[in-house]
Image (cartoon, rainbow, N blue to C red):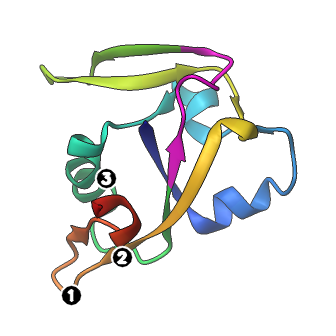
Amino acid sequence: MIYHIVPRGEWQSQGDQMVYTPKSLGDEGFIHCSELKQLLGSASRYYKGRTDLLVLTVDPNRVIPTIVFENAREGEEPFPHIYGPLNRNAVVGIHPLQARPDGEFTLPETLAG
């Protein structure tokens, strides 16, 4: 599985559309994702302290657009990027991402198993 962090309002604003098209797709040409081992680092780096986040569990075998594992800017660790709108039937789980009082995040219990 791969994972995508999204503000709850952004996810909900797209309603029942067949595809999910986040702002990053228009800005950068792909949807940012993480592997499970990268998820908390990504959350802390880009969303520290936010309380309105969801984590989407995405089954890469169901994703229609191309997924490319590539290094982030200034990084040496490849991250999965989805190059196109994400078909919603590839999203197999939605989990709230809770910030601790220090602003860092804890892995949702539903993913920690």
Residue receiving disc 1: 101
Residue at point 24%, 70% (across, down): 106
Q: Quadrant of residue 17?
A: top right
Residue at point 30%, 77% (across, down): 99
**In the foreground, 101 or 112:** 112
Q: Nearer the viewer, mark 2 or mark 3?
A: 2
- Secondary structure beneath disc 1? loop
Residue receiving disc 3: 46
- Secondary structure beneath disc 3? helix
Q: Is residue 92 left or right of residue 52?
A: right
Residue 76 visible (yes or no): yes
Separation of residues labelled 2 and 1 (CA atoms) = 10 Å
- Secondary structure beneath disc 2? strand
Separation of residues labelled 2 and 3 (CA atoms) = 14 Å
Q: Is residue 110 left or right of residue 28?
A: left
Please, what is the three-letter code of the amino acid marked with disc 1? Pro
Please, what is the three-letter code of the amino acid marked with disc 2? Gln
Quarter of the picture containing the N terminus is: top left
Q: Is residue 11 above or below residue 77?
A: below
Residue at point 66%, 67% (across, down): 9
Q: Residue furthest left?
A: 76
- The numbered dot on residue 98 is 2
The numbered mark, 3 or 1, whose residue comes first in the sequence reads 3
Q: Is residue 80 left or right of residue 24?
A: left
Quarter of the picture containing the C terminus is: bottom left
Residue at point 25%, 69% (across, down): 105
Neighbourhood count class around disc 2 (C-alpha, 10 Å): few under 14, some 14–19, many 20 upward: some
* Range shown magenta: 56-66
Q: Position of residue 41 (x, y in %)?
A: 20, 50
